[in-house]
Image (cartoon, rainbow, N blue to C red):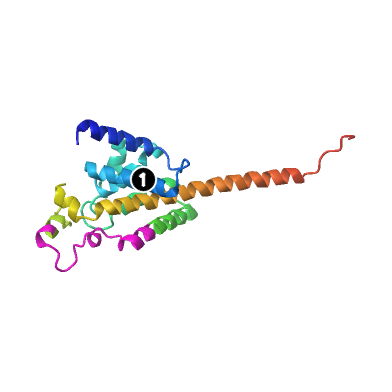
Amino acid sequence: MSEATVMEERAARDSVAAGYGTGGKSETEVKSEAAARAQGFFEEGYNCCQSVFLAFAKQYGFDRETACRLSASFGGGVGRLRQICGAVSAMALVCGLETGAVEGADQAAKAYNYENVQQLAAQFEAQSGSLICRELLGLDQEGADKELREKMQGGMGRHQPQARDEQYYATRPCKRLIGLAAEITQKWLTDRSNAGQESKAQTKSNAGQKSEAQPKPNAEE
């Protein structure tokens, strides 16, 4: 793929990522577009967390460099420690931008944020089988290819990322899981947007009913 083609695809992904409303498209189409954006970033070489976060970051005002730096350390199960999956961490980052508490003493806001993070994580785990990087990669399975497992193995002192070659993409579930995380995040955002619109419409309707219920002034007065 030429550099010009890569740049064109990158610009297209960034322009689509500017909003998360359905824009007249079906929910399936919107979810698929989010997954394609995230998977496209992964194919460019970004790690799991960066790929999912980049698919949504622009709508929050982040330029590419800032978004990449914010999400960089969560790749490989946090710094290649093979702990919580980077795609899940990206979901949590987006959730924080939407629902994060901004006052240290606001217990209700913290609880609301944690509740939403747990809901997102639960959906991911239900469809993937785990939230843990090493489990998702099958590093603990008996009979796993020893050489491949050594390449994929993370942990303290194992900080060198694996080369992005054909074997990398053929043996890892990462691209599929990145698409899954993006779809779950997109649906959550769309549901929030729709709920907000319904709430505004209901408030407007209630205000109209209250106005109609008010007694009209007597013209003779």
Give the side of residue 168 with respect to residue 73, left or right: left
Give the side of residue 14 with respect to residue 23, left or right: left
As drawn, which residue projects farthest toward the right? Answer: 220
Residue on which disc 1 sits = 34
Q: Quadrant of the N terminus?
A: top left
Give how far across and how far down residue 94 sits, in percent.
Answer: 38, 47
Magenta includes 144? yes
Q: In which quarter of the image is the C terminus?
A: top right
Residue 139 location, quadrant: bottom left
Residue 56 can be seen in this image: yes
* Residue 122 against residue 12 in the figure, above or below: below
Give how far across and how far down residue 161 sits, in percent.
Answer: 16, 49
Residue 171 location, quadrant: bottom left
**How many numbered marks have been drawn onto this rendered protein structure?**
1
Which residues fall within the magenta stretch? 121-148
Crowding at dot 1, Cα within 10 Å, few <14 / some 14-19 / many 20+, comes out as many
Identify the residue shown where x is 62% and y is 46%: 203
Identify the residue shown where x is 31% and y is 40%: 67
As drawn, which residue projects farthest toward the left? Answer: 147
Instruction: Determine whether the residue tagged by mark 1 lies in a helix, strand or loop.
Output: helix
Identify the residue shown where x is 17% and y is 51%: 168
* Residue 6 against residue 212 in the figure, above or below: above
Residue 96 can be seen in this image: no
Q: What residue type is labelled 1?
A: Ala
* Residue 74 against residue 220 in the figure, above or below: below
Identify the residue shown where x is 48% and y is 49%: 192
Magenta includes 92? no
Give the side of residue 187 with respect to residue 177, left or right: right
